[in-house]
């Protein structure tokens, strides 16, 4: 495959530009001894993965024992005419959503992400619940979220008002204001973004424009074309994993638009940190903040310091998360049952055979 690397870069430089570091190298020791080399997965198609290695891009196959690779994974690649992913390194972080299909599998959208940009457009109304949901997903992944308010050059309402509203949804999260058109705020954003970055947000909020502003080129297709057919106008092969000129790697996968929460309890607790703090003072340690006496959360609502909407959203997301978790449990139970049935079928057949012989 083509080599996107400049001639001057050493193979080690190439890997570190894609996020390889000493800790990964240490985790890789046994694989090195086995003659495997590290590579980072850019995209996964049916049956093969596109992987960047120190020697360039390769298409690799894998079999079930190696696990299910996803964009951002570091893998041990067995070189050869038909390269193979022999193993995946343990993921530092993983963005997981509940699968869009009716099956109860969760789906890893991206691995080893350091910063999740939660993109919110100032040009249109952004429902608070959607922002809270994206934040929960980001926190749950283990990465650090940053809220980026886009379209600062054409705000629907005063920027400072929206910024304060959004900041109130996100305790402990930086909120930046940018415009991909005027360049406002882009230098601050570029300085804040480190490591591997994903852009999260619904279609049309300006994720690709933001990516292009960070890249300094129009690599990513923006606007209606992309939204309609899911493809870019530009046929860039590896836009799932893009090196940024200022350092860092941008992951741009189509799946990161609408997100159903998978089991995300701790992520939700981080988004609603102020409710968790209040709950410490509820009379009952297992208070559900519905109608219990001595509920500190309700006291805060009555006092006007906590919006009712915020509590409703918190409980809604917790319900969704618990539902996803129970579906996942049910699936695992069903798998175990099937296994047991298969085993007892096997045993029955064995005993029948034995009984017949005796
Ligand atoms: N005026 C203005 N338009 C923007 C900005 N960011 C994105 N757009 C426009 O908004 C539309 C959607 O942007 P795009 O980057 O494709 O959004 P995506 O679907 O989230 O990737 C495009 O027509 C962009 O040109 C911005 O900061 N200012
Ligand atoms: Mg886009
Ligand atoms: Zn309570």
Image (cartoon, grey):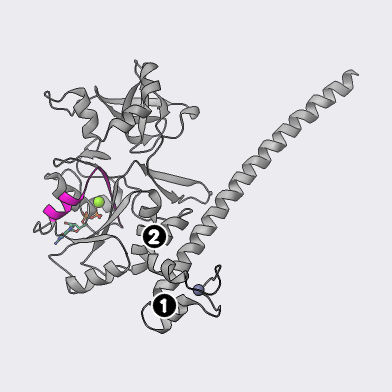
The magenta stretch spans residue 85: no
Viewer-proximal residue among 52 and 295: 295
**Which is nearer the N-term, disc 2 or disc 1?**
2
Instruction: Please rate how many residues cluster around mark 2, counting C-alpha atoms within 10 Å: few if below 14, some from 14 to 19, many from 20.
Output: some
Identified at 91% across, 19% down, the residue is: 358
Measuring from the top left, give residue 46's x and y in whole percent. Answer: 41, 33
Q: Quadrant of residue 71?
A: top left
Q: Which residue is mark 2?
A: 270
The magenta stretch spans residue 199: yes
* Left or right: 218 in relation to 335: left
Identified at 21% across, 74% down, the residue is: 161
Quarter holding ligand 1 = bottom left
Identified at 17% across, 53% down, the residue is: 189
Mark 2: C-beta under 8 Å from nearest atom of ligand 3:
no
Against 34, residue 245 (above or below) is: below
Stretch of the chain drawn in magenta:
186-201
Against 149, residue 239 (above or below) is: above
Q: Quadrant of the N terminus?
A: top left
Kind of element beneath mark 2: helix
Against 234, residue 314 (above or below) is: below
Gap in angstroms between the C-alphas marked 2 and 1: 18 Å
Against 179, residue 297 (above or below) is: below
Q: Which residue is mark 1?
A: 308
* Left or right: 298 in relation to 344: left
Kind of element beneath mark 1: helix
Measuring from the top left, give residue 219's x and y in whole percent. Answer: 17, 43
């Amino acid at each position: 495959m083509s080599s996107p690397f400049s001639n001057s870069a050493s193979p080690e430089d190439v890997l570190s530009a894609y996020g390889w570091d000493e800790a990964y190298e240490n985790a890789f020791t046994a694989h090195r001894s086995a003659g495997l080399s590290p590579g980072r997965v850019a995209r996964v198609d049916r049956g093969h993965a596109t992987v960047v290695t120190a020697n360039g891009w390769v298409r690799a196959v894998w079999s079930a024992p190696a696990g299910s690779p996803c964009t951002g994974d570091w893998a041990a690649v067995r070189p050869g005419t038909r390269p193979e992913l022999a193993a995946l390194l343990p993921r530092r972080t993983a963005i997981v959503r509940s699968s869009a299909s009716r099956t109860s599998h969760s789906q890893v959208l991206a691995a080893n992400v350091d910063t999740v940009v939660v993109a919110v457009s100032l040009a249109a109304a952004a429902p608070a619940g959607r922002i809270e949901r994206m934040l929960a997903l980001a926190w749950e992944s283990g990465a650090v979220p940053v809220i980026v308010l886009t379209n600062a050059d054409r705000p629907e309402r005063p920027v400072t008002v929206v910024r304060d509203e959004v900041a109130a949804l996100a305790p402990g999260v930086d909120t930046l204001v940018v415009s991909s058109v005027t360049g406002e705020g882009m230098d601050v954003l570029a300085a804040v973004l480190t490591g591997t970055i994903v852009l999260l947000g619904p279609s049309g909020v300006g994720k690709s424009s933001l990516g292009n502003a960070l890249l300094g080129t129009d690599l990513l297709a923006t606007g209606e074309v992309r939204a309609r057919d899911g493809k870019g106008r530009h046929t860039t092969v590896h836009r799932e994993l893009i090196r940024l000129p200022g350092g860092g790697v941008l992951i741009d996968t189509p799946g990161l638009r609408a997100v159903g929460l998978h089991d995300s309890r701790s992520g939700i607790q981080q988004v609603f940190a102020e409710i968790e703090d209040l709950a410490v003072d509820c009379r009952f340690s297992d208070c559900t903040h519905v109608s219990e006496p001595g509920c500190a959360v309700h006291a805060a609502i009555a006092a006007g310091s906590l919006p009712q909407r915020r509590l409703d959203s918190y409980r809604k997301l917790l319900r969704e998360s618990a539902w996803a978790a129970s579906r996942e449990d049910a699936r695992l139970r069903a798998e175990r049952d099937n296994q047991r049935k298969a085993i007892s079928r096997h045993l029955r057949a064995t005993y029948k055979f034995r009984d017949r012989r005796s």
